[in-house]
Image: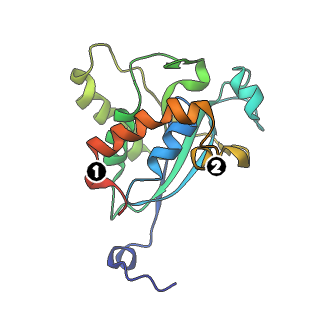
Amino acid sequence: MNDNNPRRECNMAMETCVLGGGCFWCLDTSFRLVEGVEQVVCGYAGGHDPAPRYEAVCRGATGHAEVVELTYDPAVIGFRDLLTIFFALHDPTTLNRQGNDVGTQYRSAIFTLNETQAREAREVIAELEDDYSAPIVTEVAPLEAFHPAEEYHQDYFTKNPGNAYCQFVIPPKRQKLIQRFSDRLKG
């Protein structure tokens, strides 16, 4: 691949993080717009079922949260920057709920891959605490396993523009991203 991006030539080492902030479709469609995010995969983390399926996760039967796994270029965007965007896209003060989506599967969570991510996540939460009128309840836990969601959930917004959720819930989050982080979006 001959891509004239000097950043790519300098740093071929990608990093990964796993974030849960309500319905994974919302985070998926927003993070796909962020410069430096190379891949977004919807999935499940933080539960006890070794092979979670969407229907069971939605019933709250598996203990999993709906999450996105982000693969990103740290030479372009750092973990802390991703967390800043993450916190702006959802309400980290509501326990097991984002809007009308209610249940532990919609909890705010950062599933960390190493101690550096865990430390940085706790630091960012501490820095943001005064910005909210209620305590941040975002779970910070080591990632035990990430399970990719079924294929039809990947890039759901693009594939299903007529879906009511895609018409009413996702666009305000995308608009918030565009307004607050226009300098961080792909050209």
Q: Which residue is mark 2?
A: 159
Classify residue 29 as left or right of residue 11.
right
Label annotation for residue 182: 1
Q: Quadrant of the C terminus?
A: bottom left
Classify residue 114 as left or right of residue 148.
left
How has the structure been colored for display? rainbow
Q: CA gap, disc 2 to disc 1?
A: 24 Å
Q: Nearer the viewer, mark 2 or mark 1?
A: 2
- For marks 2 and 1, the one nearer the N-term is 2
> Where does the image place residue 17, in percent across and percent down from the top left?
48, 48
Evaluate whether residue 181 shows in this view. Answer: yes
> Where does the image place residue 148, in percent across and percent down from the top left?
67, 46
Label annotation for residue 167: none
Towards the viewer: 80 or 181: 181
Query: Tag 2, which secondary structure?
Result: helix
Please name the residue shown 31% across and 30% down the image: 125
Classify residue 121 as left or right of residue 49.
left
> Where does the image place residue 13, in percent across and percent down from the top left?
45, 68
Q: How many marks?
A: 2
Under mark 2, the amino acid is Lys
Query: Tag 1, which secondary structure?
Result: helix
What is the quadrant of residue 93 in the picture?
A: top left
Please name the residue shown 49% across and 35% down the image: 170
Q: Say few, some or many: other residues with alpha carbon within 10 Å of mark 1 (under 14 / 14 to 19 / 20 or more).
A: some
Under mark 1, the amino acid is Ser
> Where does the image place residue 123, in percent across and percent down from the top left?
29, 35
